[in-house]
Amino acid sequence: MVRLLETRNIVNNMTELKRIIKAGFINFKRGGAVSFAAVVVATITLSVITSIILLQAVLYFSLDSIKNKVDVTIYFNVGVSPDKIMLVKSSLEKLPEVGNVSYTSSEEALRLFRERHQNDYPTIAALDEIGTNPLGAYLNVKAKEVSQYESIANFLKGDDSLLLGTATIIDKVNYHQNKLVIERLNTIIGSAQKLGFLITLVLIIISIIITFNTIRLTIFFAREEIGVMRLVGASKMRVRGPFMIEGAIYGIVATIATLVIFWPVTFWTGRTMTNFLGLNMYDYYIENFFQIFAIILLSGILLGVISSFLAIRKYLNK
């Protein structure tokens, strides 16, 4: 008997859900111009969110490009054996702050120096006159985060493997020359991330308010129908459900419209503004299409459902 009642309840709930979904689609079709306006507003909202995603991609790409140009170079004295340099390299690679360590031999350093100064004839002539290699080998160290270079520099000061008798095997470390640039870059990165989050939050709140007011307008036109349903004893979920489904439909249709709009927009941006932005927007859009689709679809549905849920409370609380 209990199982039979449970089965009947499940069937009744499924039937009620189907009716709510069907009523939601009917409301959407019947809305006409109002539904169209709600979809347009939702599309604008989702376009703002998509623009934020793409602009953040450009911001982080630019910051990563700048970060990749920042490093610490350890210059070793001339004649230090490669084995001792490899020992230092191994010690650095064990640090959790270090992302990558590259080794350049003294011979390679001389070759690169000649390439950089190939048009500087006095410098090349002086090198030829010396007859020996005046340059030592060096290690190029890249940290995982810009803020971690100072701890790497501090490690180098206290590392026993750097001592050769009483004299250090290191000629110089350029961290202190780059310290001001690194600190400023670290500040810029932190500020840019906070500003990006703040702008995103403000725009999303504005978008939610606009969408909420638009959906509230659609519910206003159906206020008499809501009143009748309440008079005949319809549950709050039976009244609220179709409007929440309608809001979800707004979000789904707006998602499709937004993705279609941004297809040619990113294609044009990728062709004309890649050099300026540093990132091919179209390639990024295609490569991350499913992630963007999921974010926009979820945002659209939640925006429509939550806005509808809040907008109809006024008529249910009477």
Image: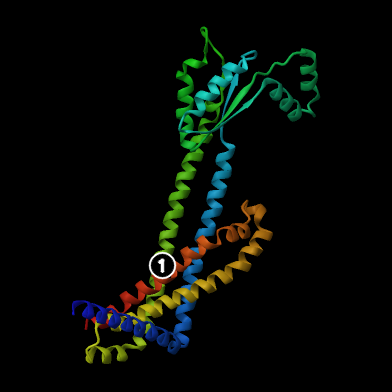
Which residue type carries mark 1?
Answer: Ile
Q: Residues within 10 Å of mark 1 (few under 14, many from 20)?
A: few
**In the figure, 226 relative to 93: above or below?**
below
Q: Where's residue 245, x and y in %? A: 38, 79
- Of residues 242 and 6, which is closer to you in this image? 6
Q: Where's residue 142, x and y in %? A: 55, 33
**Helix or strand or loop: what does disc 1 sit on?**
helix
Residue 214 visible to the viewer: no
Q: Where's residue 86, x and y in %? A: 57, 21
Q: Residue at x 47, y 19 (%)?
A: 157
**In the figure, 234 relative to 69: above or below?**
below
Left or right relative to 111: residue 243: left
Instruction: Specify the quadrant of the image occupied by residue 200.
Output: bottom left
Residue 245 visible to the viewer: yes
Q: Residue at x 49, y 44 (%)?
A: 188
Residue to which mark 1 is pinned:
206
